[in-house]
Amino acid sequence: MPSEQILAASAKHPKPDTTFQYGTAGFRMKANLLDSVVFRVGLLASLRSRKLNGQTIGVMITASHNPPEDNGIKLVDPMGEMLEQSWESHATWLANSPDDKTVVERYHTIASELKINLENKANVIYARDTRASGSSLVASLVDALQSSGAVYTDYKLLTTPQLHYLVRCINTKGTQYEYGEVSEKGYYEKLADAFKRAIKGKTVSGAVTVDCANGVGGPKLREFLKYLPTAADGGIDIKVVNDDVLKPEALNMNCGADYVKTGQRAPPSSKASPGDRCCSLDGDADRIVYYFVNPKDNAFQLLDGDRIATLAASFLADLSRQAGLSEKLAVGVVQTAYANGASTHYITSDLKLPVVCTATGVKHLHHAATRFDIGVYFEANGHGTVLFSPKAVKQLTYAYEPQSPAQKTALDTLRALLDLINQAVGDALSDMLLVEVILAHKGWGMTEWTRTYVDLPNRLVRVEVRDRGMFKVVDAERQMEEPKNIQSQLNELVQKYKDGRSFARPSGTEDAMRVYAEAATRAEADQLATRVADLVKRFGA
Ligand code: G16
Protein backbone atom coordinates (compact mmCIF):
# COMPACT_ATOMS: atom_id res chain seq x y z
CA MET A 1 0.00 0.00 0.00
CA PRO A 2 1.64 3.29 -1.08
CA SER A 3 0.19 5.20 1.93
CA GLU A 4 1.95 2.91 4.37
CA GLN A 5 5.08 2.93 2.28
CA ILE A 6 5.04 6.71 2.07
CA LEU A 7 4.51 6.94 5.82
CA ALA A 8 7.42 4.61 6.53
CA ALA A 9 9.70 6.33 4.02
CA SER A 10 8.76 9.79 5.26
CA ALA A 11 9.87 8.83 8.78
CA LYS A 12 13.43 8.70 7.43
CA HIS A 13 13.15 12.34 6.30
CA PRO A 14 11.95 14.42 9.26
CA LYS A 15 11.22 18.08 8.74
CA PRO A 16 13.54 20.54 10.52
CA ASP A 17 12.11 23.52 12.34
CA THR A 18 12.04 25.73 9.24
CA THR A 19 9.31 27.13 7.02
CA PHE A 20 9.83 26.36 3.36
CA GLN A 21 8.72 28.35 0.35
CA TYR A 22 8.76 27.41 -3.33
CA GLY A 23 10.68 30.45 -4.60
CA THR A 24 11.91 31.97 -7.85
CA ALA A 25 13.37 28.65 -8.95
CA GLY A 26 11.99 26.01 -6.58
CA PHE A 27 13.20 25.42 -3.03
CA ARG A 28 16.67 26.67 -2.35
CA MET A 29 18.66 26.94 0.89
CA LYS A 30 21.49 25.41 2.91
CA ALA A 31 21.70 21.81 1.74
CA ASN A 32 21.53 20.39 5.28
CA LEU A 33 17.94 21.66 5.58
CA LEU A 34 16.70 20.12 2.36
CA ASP A 35 16.33 16.40 3.02
CA SER A 36 12.61 16.45 3.91
CA VAL A 37 11.86 18.99 1.18
CA VAL A 38 13.42 16.80 -1.50
CA PHE A 39 11.49 13.77 -0.27
CA ARG A 40 8.21 15.66 -0.38
CA VAL A 41 8.91 17.26 -3.75
CA GLY A 42 9.53 13.73 -4.99
CA LEU A 43 6.02 12.81 -3.85
CA LEU A 44 4.65 15.84 -5.64
CA ALA A 45 6.48 14.88 -8.84
CA SER A 46 4.63 11.55 -8.74
CA LEU A 47 1.32 13.35 -8.26
CA ARG A 48 2.08 15.79 -11.05
CA SER A 49 2.88 12.98 -13.48
CA ARG A 50 -0.25 11.06 -12.48
CA LYS A 51 -2.34 14.20 -12.93
CA LEU A 52 -0.94 14.46 -16.47
CA ASN A 53 -1.71 10.83 -17.27
CA GLY A 54 1.80 9.57 -16.81
CA GLN A 55 3.65 12.22 -18.80
CA THR A 56 7.23 12.45 -17.61
CA ILE A 57 8.10 15.09 -15.01
CA GLY A 58 11.68 16.26 -14.40
CA VAL A 59 13.33 16.89 -11.06
CA MET A 60 16.53 18.92 -10.97
CA ILE A 61 18.66 19.09 -7.85
CA THR A 62 20.71 22.25 -8.08
CA ALA A 63 21.23 25.61 -6.46
CA SER A 64 22.59 27.12 -9.65
CA HIS A 65 24.33 30.41 -8.82
CA ASN A 66 24.17 29.97 -5.03
CA PRO A 67 27.24 29.13 -2.90
CA PRO A 68 28.51 25.52 -2.72
CA GLU A 69 26.91 24.77 0.66
CA ASP A 70 23.42 25.51 -0.71
CA ASN A 71 21.30 23.21 -2.79
CA GLY A 72 17.83 23.24 -4.24
CA ILE A 73 15.18 21.34 -6.08
CA LYS A 74 12.79 22.27 -8.84
CA LEU A 75 10.24 20.47 -10.98
CA VAL A 76 10.09 20.48 -14.76
CA ASP A 77 6.75 20.16 -16.56
CA PRO A 78 6.21 17.94 -19.63
CA MET A 79 7.21 20.43 -22.34
CA GLY A 80 10.37 21.26 -20.43
CA GLU A 81 8.93 24.39 -18.82
CA MET A 82 9.00 25.24 -15.13
CA LEU A 83 6.33 23.68 -12.92
CA GLU A 84 2.88 25.20 -13.51
CA GLN A 85 2.59 28.04 -11.03
CA SER A 86 -0.67 26.89 -9.46
CA TRP A 87 1.25 23.83 -8.20
CA GLU A 88 3.85 25.86 -6.34
CA SER A 89 1.46 26.32 -3.43
CA HIS A 90 0.89 22.54 -3.29
CA ALA A 91 4.65 22.08 -3.15
CA THR A 92 4.96 24.61 -0.34
CA TRP A 93 2.05 23.06 1.57
CA LEU A 94 3.40 19.53 1.30
CA ALA A 95 6.94 20.65 2.19
CA ASN A 96 5.64 22.27 5.37
CA SER A 97 3.71 19.24 6.64
CA PRO A 98 4.70 19.12 10.32
CA ASP A 99 4.95 15.31 10.56
CA ASP A 100 4.83 12.09 8.51
CA LYS A 101 1.14 11.45 9.07
CA THR A 102 0.36 14.91 7.72
CA VAL A 103 2.60 14.26 4.72
CA VAL A 104 0.44 11.28 3.78
CA GLU A 105 -2.78 13.18 4.50
CA ARG A 106 -1.74 16.14 2.37
CA TYR A 107 -0.55 13.83 -0.41
CA HIS A 108 -4.07 12.39 -0.54
CA THR A 109 -5.79 15.76 -0.13
CA ILE A 110 -3.90 17.15 -3.12
CA ALA A 111 -4.81 14.01 -5.08
CA SER A 112 -8.49 14.27 -4.27
CA GLU A 113 -8.77 18.07 -4.69
CA LEU A 114 -7.06 17.93 -8.07
CA LYS A 115 -8.95 14.76 -9.05
CA ILE A 116 -5.77 12.78 -9.56
CA ASN A 117 -6.23 9.11 -10.26
CA LEU A 118 -3.63 7.43 -8.06
CA GLU A 119 -3.89 4.34 -10.23
CA ASN A 120 -2.32 6.29 -13.12
CA LYS A 121 1.33 5.63 -13.88
CA ALA A 122 3.90 8.16 -12.64
CA ASN A 123 7.08 8.74 -14.65
CA VAL A 124 9.88 10.90 -13.35
CA ILE A 125 13.43 11.61 -14.50
CA TYR A 126 16.01 13.47 -12.46
CA ALA A 127 19.53 14.86 -12.52
CA ARG A 128 21.76 16.99 -10.34
CA ASP A 129 24.63 19.44 -10.55
CA THR A 130 28.10 18.85 -9.07
CA ARG A 131 27.40 19.93 -5.47
CA ALA A 132 28.73 17.62 -2.75
CA SER A 133 25.26 17.36 -1.19
CA GLY A 134 23.67 16.20 -4.44
CA SER A 135 24.02 12.44 -4.07
CA SER A 136 22.46 12.23 -0.58
CA LEU A 137 19.57 14.41 -1.73
CA VAL A 138 19.09 12.09 -4.69
CA ALA A 139 18.72 9.24 -2.18
CA SER A 140 15.88 11.17 -0.45
CA LEU A 141 14.24 11.73 -3.81
CA VAL A 142 14.47 8.05 -4.69
CA ASP A 143 12.81 7.14 -1.37
CA ALA A 144 9.85 9.31 -2.38
CA LEU A 145 9.64 7.96 -5.92
CA GLN A 146 9.83 4.35 -4.74
CA SER A 147 7.33 4.72 -1.93
CA SER A 148 4.85 6.51 -4.19
CA GLY A 149 5.27 3.91 -6.93
CA ALA A 150 6.78 6.09 -9.65
CA VAL A 151 8.89 4.74 -12.50
CA TYR A 152 12.09 6.78 -12.57
CA THR A 153 15.37 7.25 -14.40
CA ASP A 154 18.51 8.77 -12.94
CA TYR A 155 20.35 10.94 -15.49
CA LYS A 156 23.13 11.61 -12.95
CA LEU A 157 25.05 14.83 -13.63
CA LEU A 158 23.50 17.20 -16.16
CA THR A 159 23.14 20.90 -16.72
CA THR A 160 19.65 22.11 -15.81
CA PRO A 161 18.80 22.87 -19.47
CA GLN A 162 19.87 19.37 -20.51
CA LEU A 163 17.33 17.90 -18.10
CA HIS A 164 14.64 20.23 -19.46
CA TYR A 165 15.59 19.12 -22.98
CA LEU A 166 15.26 15.43 -22.05
CA VAL A 167 11.86 15.94 -20.44
CA ARG A 168 10.58 17.62 -23.59
CA CYS A 169 12.08 14.95 -25.85
CA ILE A 170 10.47 12.13 -23.86
CA ASN A 171 7.02 13.72 -23.83
CA THR A 172 7.02 14.68 -27.50
CA LYS A 173 8.46 11.43 -28.82
CA GLY A 174 6.32 10.05 -31.64
CA THR A 175 4.22 13.24 -31.90
CA GLN A 176 4.33 16.03 -34.49
CA TYR A 177 6.26 18.12 -31.92
CA GLU A 178 9.12 15.62 -31.56
CA TYR A 179 11.97 17.63 -30.04
CA GLY A 180 15.02 15.39 -30.29
CA GLU A 181 16.68 12.16 -29.33
CA VAL A 182 16.21 11.24 -25.66
CA SER A 183 19.83 11.25 -24.56
CA GLU A 184 22.63 13.59 -23.60
CA LYS A 185 24.32 12.62 -26.86
CA GLY A 186 21.12 13.55 -28.70
CA TYR A 187 21.30 17.01 -27.12
CA TYR A 188 24.88 17.56 -28.33
CA GLU A 189 24.14 16.21 -31.78
CA LYS A 190 21.04 18.34 -32.25
CA LEU A 191 22.76 21.55 -31.20
CA ALA A 192 25.97 20.80 -33.10
CA ASP A 193 24.09 20.03 -36.30
CA ALA A 194 22.00 23.20 -35.95
CA PHE A 195 25.14 25.24 -35.28
CA LYS A 196 26.79 23.91 -38.45
CA ARG A 197 23.75 24.88 -40.51
CA ALA A 198 23.44 28.29 -38.88
CA ILE A 199 27.09 29.22 -39.33
CA LYS A 200 27.37 27.96 -42.92
CA GLY A 201 29.31 30.37 -45.11
CA LYS A 202 30.22 32.61 -42.14
CA THR A 203 33.34 32.76 -40.00
CA VAL A 204 33.53 33.00 -36.23
CA SER A 205 36.26 35.52 -35.55
CA GLY A 206 38.83 34.49 -32.92
CA ALA A 207 38.36 32.26 -29.90
CA VAL A 208 35.80 32.53 -27.12
CA THR A 209 36.91 31.80 -23.55
CA VAL A 210 34.20 30.17 -21.45
CA ASP A 211 34.32 30.39 -17.64
CA CYS A 212 32.26 27.43 -16.41
CA ALA A 213 31.93 28.61 -12.76
CA ASN A 214 33.60 25.32 -11.71
CA GLY A 215 30.20 23.74 -12.17
CA VAL A 216 28.57 21.04 -14.23
CA GLY A 217 28.82 23.20 -17.36
CA GLY A 218 32.59 22.50 -17.45
CA PRO A 219 32.57 18.75 -18.10
CA LYS A 220 29.45 19.08 -20.25
CA LEU A 221 31.00 21.75 -22.45
CA ARG A 222 34.15 19.63 -22.83
CA GLU A 223 31.94 16.75 -23.96
CA PHE A 224 30.01 19.05 -26.30
CA LEU A 225 33.28 20.14 -27.96
CA LYS A 226 33.64 16.61 -29.35
CA TYR A 227 30.55 17.29 -31.49
CA LEU A 228 31.24 20.88 -32.51
CA PRO A 229 33.39 21.70 -35.56
CA THR A 230 36.61 23.47 -34.67
CA ALA A 231 37.59 26.79 -36.21
CA ALA A 232 39.82 24.92 -38.67
CA ASP A 233 36.71 23.04 -39.87
CA GLY A 234 34.65 26.20 -40.28
CA GLY A 235 33.37 26.06 -36.69
CA ILE A 236 34.40 27.61 -33.42
CA ASP A 237 37.43 27.77 -31.15
CA ILE A 238 36.28 27.45 -27.52
CA LYS A 239 38.67 27.71 -24.57
CA VAL A 240 37.25 26.17 -21.40
CA VAL A 241 38.34 27.68 -18.06
CA ASN A 242 37.16 27.28 -14.45
CA ASP A 243 35.99 23.72 -15.00
CA ASP A 244 37.29 22.19 -11.76
CA VAL A 245 34.44 20.08 -10.40
CA LEU A 246 36.65 17.99 -8.13
CA LYS A 247 36.85 20.80 -5.59
CA PRO A 248 33.18 21.37 -4.68
CA GLU A 249 34.09 24.50 -2.71
CA ALA A 250 35.30 26.16 -5.93
CA LEU A 251 31.78 26.25 -7.40
CA ASN A 252 30.73 29.83 -8.27
CA MET A 253 33.66 31.11 -6.18
CA ASN A 254 35.15 34.26 -7.72
CA CYS A 255 33.89 33.16 -11.10
CA GLY A 256 30.72 32.43 -12.99
CA ALA A 257 27.93 34.53 -14.46
CA ASP A 258 26.55 35.84 -11.17
CA TYR A 259 29.98 36.94 -9.94
CA VAL A 260 30.68 38.76 -13.21
CA LYS A 261 27.25 40.37 -13.52
CA THR A 262 26.89 41.45 -9.90
CA GLY A 263 30.45 42.66 -9.48
CA GLN A 264 30.79 43.98 -13.04
CA ARG A 265 34.28 42.52 -13.24
CA ALA A 266 36.06 39.56 -14.84
CA PRO A 267 36.95 36.55 -12.66
CA PRO A 268 40.36 37.27 -11.06
CA SER A 269 41.61 34.01 -12.58
CA SER A 270 40.99 35.34 -16.09
CA LYS A 271 44.06 35.36 -18.31
CA ALA A 272 42.22 37.01 -21.20
CA SER A 273 44.01 39.77 -23.06
CA PRO A 274 42.34 43.06 -23.96
CA GLY A 275 39.84 42.51 -26.75
CA ASP A 276 39.43 38.77 -26.09
CA ARG A 277 35.84 37.56 -26.21
CA CYS A 278 34.90 35.93 -22.89
CA CYS A 279 31.75 34.58 -21.32
CA SER A 280 30.75 33.07 -17.99
CA LEU A 281 28.18 30.39 -17.23
CA ASP A 282 26.59 29.85 -13.82
CA GLY A 283 26.71 26.73 -11.63
CA ASP A 284 24.15 24.73 -13.61
CA ALA A 285 24.77 26.36 -17.01
CA ASP A 286 21.43 28.04 -17.52
CA ARG A 287 22.80 31.59 -17.53
CA ILE A 288 25.47 33.30 -19.59
CA VAL A 289 26.99 36.76 -19.77
CA TYR A 290 29.69 38.01 -22.15
CA TYR A 291 32.48 40.51 -21.44
CA PHE A 292 35.81 41.80 -22.59
CA VAL A 293 38.42 44.34 -21.67
CA ASN A 294 38.26 47.22 -24.11
CA PRO A 295 41.71 47.52 -25.74
CA LYS A 296 41.21 51.29 -26.12
CA ASP A 297 40.96 52.18 -22.44
CA ASN A 298 41.39 48.85 -20.62
CA ALA A 299 37.89 49.24 -19.19
CA PHE A 300 35.90 46.12 -18.37
CA GLN A 301 32.81 45.91 -20.54
CA LEU A 302 29.92 43.61 -19.67
CA LEU A 303 27.45 42.31 -22.25
CA ASP A 304 24.72 40.85 -20.10
CA GLY A 305 21.32 39.29 -20.74
CA ASP A 306 19.94 42.61 -22.01
CA ARG A 307 22.67 42.72 -24.65
CA ILE A 308 21.98 39.13 -25.66
CA ALA A 309 18.25 39.87 -25.88
CA THR A 310 18.77 42.94 -28.06
CA LEU A 311 21.28 41.13 -30.28
CA ALA A 312 18.94 38.16 -30.74
CA ALA A 313 15.82 40.26 -31.24
CA SER A 314 17.42 42.49 -33.87
CA PHE A 315 18.84 39.48 -35.73
CA LEU A 316 15.62 37.48 -35.66
CA ALA A 317 13.53 40.48 -36.74
CA ASP A 318 15.97 41.15 -39.60
CA LEU A 319 15.94 37.51 -40.68
CA SER A 320 12.17 37.30 -40.68
CA ARG A 321 12.06 40.49 -42.81
CA GLN A 322 14.66 39.07 -45.20
CA ALA A 323 12.71 35.83 -45.41
CA GLY A 324 9.55 37.77 -46.26
CA LEU A 325 7.87 36.68 -43.05
CA SER A 326 7.69 39.92 -41.07
CA GLU A 327 3.98 40.37 -41.77
CA LYS A 328 3.26 36.88 -40.55
CA LEU A 329 5.44 36.68 -37.43
CA ALA A 330 5.27 39.08 -34.49
CA VAL A 331 8.63 39.46 -32.76
CA GLY A 332 8.71 40.76 -29.18
CA VAL A 333 10.99 40.97 -26.16
CA VAL A 334 10.32 40.17 -22.50
CA GLN A 335 12.44 41.70 -19.74
CA THR A 336 12.28 42.27 -15.99
CA ALA A 337 12.74 45.41 -13.91
CA TYR A 338 16.48 44.66 -13.84
CA ALA A 339 16.74 45.40 -17.56
CA ASN A 340 18.90 48.41 -18.17
CA GLY A 341 16.71 51.38 -19.16
CA ALA A 342 18.93 51.99 -22.19
CA SER A 343 18.24 48.47 -23.50
CA THR A 344 14.48 48.91 -23.21
CA HIS A 345 14.73 52.24 -24.99
CA TYR A 346 16.84 50.67 -27.76
CA ILE A 347 14.32 47.86 -28.30
CA THR A 348 11.32 50.15 -28.54
CA SER A 349 12.90 53.16 -30.30
CA ASP A 350 15.56 51.61 -32.54
CA LEU A 351 14.41 48.06 -33.13
CA LYS A 352 10.77 49.20 -32.94
CA LEU A 353 9.76 46.01 -31.20
CA PRO A 354 7.31 45.63 -28.31
CA VAL A 355 8.67 45.01 -24.79
CA VAL A 356 6.84 43.36 -21.90
CA CYS A 357 8.09 43.59 -18.30
CA THR A 358 7.43 40.72 -15.88
CA ALA A 359 8.44 39.75 -12.36
CA THR A 360 11.83 38.07 -11.85
CA GLY A 361 12.02 34.37 -12.62
CA VAL A 362 12.20 32.70 -15.99
CA LYS A 363 8.85 31.09 -15.28
CA HIS A 364 7.25 34.55 -15.61
CA LEU A 365 9.23 35.62 -18.65
CA HIS A 366 8.74 32.32 -20.45
CA HIS A 367 5.00 32.57 -20.06
CA ALA A 368 4.91 36.14 -21.40
CA ALA A 369 7.15 35.22 -24.36
CA THR A 370 4.64 32.63 -25.57
CA ARG A 371 2.36 35.53 -26.56
CA PHE A 372 4.67 36.42 -29.47
CA ASP A 373 5.41 34.34 -32.56
CA ILE A 374 9.09 34.87 -31.87
CA GLY A 375 9.40 35.76 -28.19
CA VAL A 376 12.85 36.73 -26.99
CA TYR A 377 13.16 36.68 -23.22
CA PHE A 378 16.20 37.37 -21.11
CA GLU A 379 16.82 38.47 -17.57
CA ALA A 380 19.69 40.92 -17.24
CA ASN A 381 21.56 38.21 -15.31
CA GLY A 382 21.86 36.20 -18.53
CA HIS A 383 19.01 33.75 -18.08
CA GLY A 384 16.84 33.43 -21.15
CA THR A 385 16.03 32.01 -24.54
CA VAL A 386 13.82 32.51 -27.59
CA LEU A 387 10.44 30.85 -28.08
CA PHE A 388 8.85 30.14 -31.44
CA SER A 389 5.07 29.80 -31.39
CA PRO A 390 3.39 26.79 -33.07
CA LYS A 391 2.39 29.20 -35.85
CA ALA A 392 6.02 30.28 -36.33
CA VAL A 393 7.22 26.67 -36.32
CA LYS A 394 4.66 25.81 -38.98
CA GLN A 395 5.67 28.75 -41.17
CA LEU A 396 9.37 28.07 -40.81
CA THR A 397 9.30 24.33 -41.25
CA TYR A 398 6.83 23.77 -44.08
CA ALA A 399 4.03 26.26 -44.69
CA TYR A 400 5.97 29.18 -46.10
CA GLU A 401 7.42 29.17 -49.63
CA PRO A 402 10.29 31.63 -50.09
CA GLN A 403 10.03 33.77 -53.22
CA SER A 404 13.73 34.35 -53.91
CA PRO A 405 17.15 32.83 -53.15
CA ALA A 406 17.73 35.61 -50.58
CA GLN A 407 14.48 34.72 -48.82
CA LYS A 408 15.45 31.04 -48.89
CA THR A 409 18.86 31.79 -47.31
CA ALA A 410 17.24 33.76 -44.49
CA LEU A 411 14.65 31.03 -43.99
CA ASP A 412 17.35 28.35 -43.77
CA THR A 413 19.13 30.33 -41.06
CA LEU A 414 15.87 30.75 -39.14
CA ARG A 415 15.26 27.01 -39.40
CA ALA A 416 18.74 26.31 -38.04
CA LEU A 417 18.12 28.70 -35.14
CA LEU A 418 14.86 26.95 -34.36
CA ASP A 419 16.95 23.86 -33.59
CA LEU A 420 19.93 25.64 -32.07
CA ILE A 421 17.88 27.51 -29.48
CA ASN A 422 16.76 25.46 -26.48
CA GLN A 423 13.10 26.36 -26.37
CA ALA A 424 12.43 24.42 -23.21
CA VAL A 425 14.36 26.87 -21.03
CA GLY A 426 17.26 29.34 -20.97
CA ASP A 427 20.42 27.39 -21.77
CA ALA A 428 23.89 28.90 -21.51
CA LEU A 429 25.49 26.52 -24.04
CA SER A 430 22.76 27.03 -26.62
CA ASP A 431 22.70 30.80 -25.97
CA MET A 432 26.47 30.99 -26.41
CA LEU A 433 26.27 29.37 -29.84
CA LEU A 434 23.39 31.67 -30.74
CA VAL A 435 25.49 34.73 -29.87
CA GLU A 436 28.48 33.35 -31.78
CA VAL A 437 26.33 32.70 -34.86
CA ILE A 438 24.82 36.20 -34.77
CA LEU A 439 28.19 37.92 -34.32
CA ALA A 440 29.57 35.88 -37.24
CA HIS A 441 26.60 36.79 -39.46
CA LYS A 442 26.87 40.45 -38.60
CA GLY A 443 30.67 40.38 -38.89
CA TRP A 444 30.80 41.97 -35.44
CA GLY A 445 33.36 41.81 -32.69
CA MET A 446 32.68 42.81 -29.08
CA THR A 447 33.24 46.50 -29.82
CA GLU A 448 30.57 46.59 -32.53
CA TRP A 449 28.18 44.74 -30.25
CA THR A 450 28.64 47.29 -27.45
CA ARG A 451 28.02 50.17 -29.87
CA THR A 452 24.30 49.43 -30.25
CA TYR A 453 23.48 51.48 -27.14
CA VAL A 454 25.19 52.85 -24.04
CA ASP A 455 24.18 51.20 -20.78
CA LEU A 456 23.04 53.47 -18.00
CA PRO A 457 25.50 52.94 -15.13
CA ASN A 458 23.85 50.59 -12.66
CA ARG A 459 24.49 48.80 -9.40
CA LEU A 460 23.04 45.69 -7.82
CA VAL A 461 23.32 45.33 -4.05
CA ARG A 462 22.45 42.42 -1.76
CA VAL A 463 21.02 43.50 1.60
CA GLU A 464 20.50 41.16 4.55
CA VAL A 465 17.41 41.87 6.64
CA ARG A 466 15.70 40.18 9.58
CA ASP A 467 12.77 38.87 7.55
CA ARG A 468 12.57 39.52 3.84
CA GLY A 469 8.95 38.26 3.94
CA MET A 470 7.90 41.65 5.35
CA PHE A 471 8.65 43.30 1.97
CA LYS A 472 5.74 42.97 -0.44
CA VAL A 473 6.22 44.02 -4.06
CA VAL A 474 3.77 44.80 -6.87
CA ASP A 475 3.86 46.07 -10.47
CA ALA A 476 6.36 43.49 -11.80
CA GLU A 477 8.37 44.07 -8.60
CA ARG A 478 8.97 47.73 -9.40
CA GLN A 479 7.05 49.04 -6.35
CA MET A 480 6.99 48.05 -2.69
CA GLU A 481 3.56 47.92 -1.11
CA GLU A 482 4.88 46.96 2.31
CA PRO A 483 6.32 48.08 4.67
CA LYS A 484 4.16 51.18 4.55
CA ASN A 485 5.88 54.40 3.45
CA ILE A 486 9.04 52.75 2.18
CA GLN A 487 8.10 53.28 -1.48
CA SER A 488 7.45 57.02 -1.07
CA GLN A 489 10.85 57.41 0.61
CA LEU A 490 12.49 55.43 -2.18
CA ASN A 491 10.76 57.64 -4.77
CA GLU A 492 12.11 60.75 -3.04
CA LEU A 493 15.63 59.38 -3.27
CA VAL A 494 15.26 58.46 -6.94
CA GLN A 495 14.03 61.96 -7.84
CA LYS A 496 17.36 63.43 -6.78
CA TYR A 497 19.24 61.64 -9.59
CA LYS A 498 19.28 62.31 -13.31
CA ASP A 499 17.87 59.29 -15.15
CA GLY A 500 17.52 57.68 -11.73
CA ARG A 501 15.57 54.44 -11.32
CA SER A 502 15.65 52.03 -8.44
CA PHE A 503 13.68 49.22 -6.84
CA ALA A 504 14.08 46.67 -4.06
CA ARG A 505 12.66 43.16 -3.92
CA PRO A 506 13.06 40.05 -1.79
CA SER A 507 15.20 37.40 -3.47
CA GLY A 508 13.45 34.13 -4.20
CA THR A 509 16.67 32.12 -4.09
CA GLU A 510 18.68 33.69 -1.26
CA ASP A 511 17.80 34.94 2.20
CA ALA A 512 18.30 38.58 1.27
CA MET A 513 16.81 41.66 -0.38
CA ARG A 514 18.12 42.82 -3.74
CA VAL A 515 18.44 46.50 -4.59
CA TYR A 516 18.90 47.72 -8.15
CA ALA A 517 19.71 51.30 -9.09
CA GLU A 518 20.66 53.07 -12.29
CA ALA A 519 21.45 56.72 -12.99
CA ALA A 520 23.21 58.99 -15.47
CA THR A 521 26.72 58.52 -14.01
CA ARG A 522 28.57 55.70 -12.28
CA ALA A 523 28.97 57.71 -9.07
CA GLU A 524 25.28 58.58 -8.97
CA ALA A 525 24.17 54.98 -9.62
CA ASP A 526 26.44 53.77 -6.81
CA GLN A 527 25.21 56.46 -4.47
CA LEU A 528 21.55 55.82 -5.24
CA ALA A 529 22.03 52.06 -4.72
CA THR A 530 23.75 52.66 -1.37
CA ARG A 531 21.01 55.01 -0.21
CA VAL A 532 18.21 52.65 -1.19
CA ALA A 533 20.09 49.76 0.44
CA ASP A 534 20.33 51.82 3.64
CA LEU A 535 16.61 52.54 3.46
CA VAL A 536 15.84 48.82 3.09
CA LYS A 537 18.17 48.00 5.97
CA ARG A 538 16.43 50.56 8.17
CA PHE A 539 12.94 49.24 7.40
CA GLY A 540 14.12 45.63 7.67
CA ALA A 541 16.01 46.04 10.96
C1 G16 B 1 17.20 31.83 -10.55
C2 G16 B 1 16.03 32.03 -11.47
C3 G16 B 1 16.20 33.32 -12.22
C4 G16 B 1 16.40 34.47 -11.26
C5 G16 B 1 17.54 34.16 -10.28
C6 G16 B 1 17.63 35.18 -9.16
O1 G16 B 1 18.36 31.73 -11.32
O2 G16 B 1 15.94 30.94 -12.34
O3 G16 B 1 15.05 33.53 -13.01
O4 G16 B 1 16.71 35.64 -11.93
O5 G16 B 1 17.32 32.90 -9.67
O6 G16 B 1 16.41 35.20 -8.49
P1 G16 B 1 16.20 36.00 -7.16
O7 G16 B 1 16.62 37.40 -7.45
O8 G16 B 1 14.76 35.85 -6.84
O9 G16 B 1 17.12 35.38 -6.11
P2 G16 B 1 19.40 30.57 -11.11
O10 G16 B 1 20.36 30.73 -12.22
O11 G16 B 1 19.98 30.76 -9.75
O12 G16 B 1 18.54 29.32 -11.21
Image (cartoon, rainbow, N blue to C red):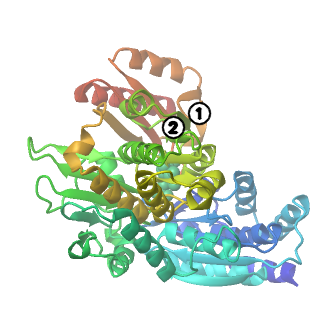
Residue 6 image point, x, y percent: 79, 79
Q: Are marks 1 and 2 in contact (CB under 8 Å)?
A: yes
Residue at point 28%, 23% (across, down): 520
Task: Tell me the quarter of the image containing the N terminus.
Answer: bottom right
Task: Name the side, left or right, on which 401 lies relative to 66.
Answer: right
Q: Which mark is residue 505?
A: 2
Q: Secondary structure at mark 1?
A: strand
Farthest-out residue, front: 404
Q: Which mark is residue 484?
A: none
Q: Mark 2 or mark 1, which is nearer the start of the sequence? A: 1
Tell me which amino acid carries mark 1: Val
Q: Residues within 10 Å of mark 2 (few under 14, many from 20)?
A: many
Above or below: residue 48 compared with residue 19: below
Residue 246 image point, x, y percent: 33, 80
Above or below: residue 425 compared with residue 103: above
Tell me which amino acid carries mark 2: Arg
Residue at point 36%, 39% (across, down): 460
Task: Name the side, left or right, on which 501 lies relative to 25.
Answer: left
Residue 264 seen from this side: no
- Which residue is at the front of the view, 196 or 420? 196
- Which residue is at the front of the view, 358 or 202? 202
Q: Residues within 10 Å of mark 1 (few under 14, many from 20)?
A: some
Q: Which residue is mark 1?
A: 473
Residue 226 seen from this side: yes
Residue 425 image-quadrant placement = bottom right
Residue 12 image point, x, y percent: 69, 80
- Which residue is at the front of the view, 232 or 369? 232
Q: Secondary structure at mark 2?
A: strand
Ligand 1 within 8 angstroms of badge 2 C-beta? yes
- Which residue is at the front of the view, 61 or 15? 61
* Distance Cα–Cα, label 1 vs label 2: 6 Å
Residue 163 image point, x, y percent: 55, 72
